[in-house]
Image (spheres, grey):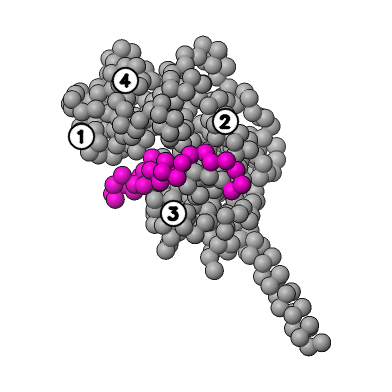
Amino acid sequence: MIQKTLYLFLLAFISINVLAQPQIAEANIEELMQQTPVMGLSVAVVKNNNIIYTKAFGLKDAETNAPLSTTDLFRIASISKSFSATSIMQLVEKKKLNLDNDVSDLIGFNVRNPKFPETVITLRMLLSHTSGINDSEGYFTLDAINPQKNANWQKCYNNYEPGKGYEYCNLNFNMVGAIIEKYSGERFDRYVPNHILKPLKLYGGYNVNELDQTRFAKLYEYNTGSAKFTYSATAYAPRKEDIANYILGYSTPIFSPTGGMKISAPDLAKYMMMHMNYGKAKGKKRIISKKSSHIMQTPLSDKENYGLALLKTTKLIEGETMTGHTGSAYGLYSAMFFQPDKKFGIVVITNGCHPAYENGYNAVIRKTVNILYNSLIKK
């Protein structure tokens, strides 16, 4: 009888503590949101290769006071780059592309730094931000770097030799998107869903006109001077006229391969698990090979720790080397980071918050990641 009572007591104690962990996380996140301006937060936590927690906090729409839901979609900004790189690796595996191909041959116009005209700019350089290309002429159209379209195309190139320096550049990935179209024969907004999202049974995409717009989380920029949030009306612009006049392999920036994926936090966590397991999601078909996945996750230099649209960092969670990417645009901040050896990962997305940074990360994002890690992951 005593043994049975002791067993029931221990079982109850364990159950209370298991239940308490999410409650502690939620209390800490709610306290953070009271101390710091945050419109809304959606989070997902993976532990032991399973999604163990999802939750949404705050508002989806400030005008109607609609609460944020875990099924709501966000434009996740630069985490989108990893979908473009994954697509490229699929085409490399099909031998339609090679990472060391000359971008000039792939894109259809001359891509050469005028200071180093003999140095080939490769696809690998675009994917790793080592191309020496910059965003000074903009990145919303390929005209920016096309010598036939822009008299100032030379300004798109830095002073160092391609392959021998690093500068984060959105134009790199809008060019990558055009290359995906040319060598797959599919429009970018269809290629990614067909070859990544649908096989993983995820809901999302780049074309807002083909998604359930009632699920879009409105994005808000926080102005520290006025201490007010401003709605970013253009974040989900339909661009129907541009799409109607689309040129395959050139108009691609319309869909923003560099930052335009719309997806929910839980579905982004499922996608993250595919990379965490080196190209294969749990119980699903393989999306890319182990070799391709390792290439994406391997930094090209110790200085930047950036591979192919995935980077490594020790500055997000103390004591952990994490792999993933961040995003920021229109007031949104996002983070998707995982530990492939320990099989855990965290996704955090906010549709608007105070823009302060700490240790190279948006402070709200970093603090939320650490709250979730300490409450739900760390032993």
Q: CA distance from mark 1 to mark 3?
A: 30 Å
Q: Which of disc 2 and disc 1 is earlier in sequence?
A: 1
Amino acid type at image mark 2: Pro
Task: Give whichever of 293, 339 is nearer the camera.
Answer: 293
Is residue 253 something one can see in this rendering? Answer: no
Q: Quadrant of residue 368?
A: bottom right
- SS category of the residue bearing label 2: helix
User: Which is more foreground, mark 2 or mark 3?
Assistant: 2
- Up-down relation of residue 322 to residue 208 (above or below): below
> Which image quadrant: the C terminus?
bottom right
On the image, numbered disc 2 is attached to which residue? 193
Label 4 environment density (alpha carbons within 10 Å; few <14, some 14–19, many ≥20): few
Q: In front: 32, or 178?
A: 178
Q: How much space separates mark 3 and mark 4, taking CA atoms?
A: 35 Å
Q: Which of disc 3 and disc 2 is earlier in sequence?
A: 2
Q: Secondary structure at mark 4?
A: helix
> Label 2 crowding class (10 Å Cα cut-off): few <14, some 14-19, many 20+?
some
Q: Is residue 372 above or below residue 105?
A: below
Q: Amino acid at mark 4?
A: Asp
Calculate the distance from the C-alpha at mark 1 to the C-alpha at mark 4.
22 Å
Residue range corresponding to the magenta coloring: 282-308
Q: Circle 1 is placed at which residue position? A: 160
- For disc 1, the neighbor class at 10 Å (few under 14, some 14 to 19, many from 20) is some
The residue tagged 3 is 322
Query: In percent of the image, x 74 and y 74: which residue is there?
Result: 12
Task: For marks 1 and 2, give the CA distance.
Answer: 37 Å
Which is more N-terminal, label 4 or label 1? 4
Left or right: 314, with 112 as reference point:
right
Residue 105 numbered tag: 4
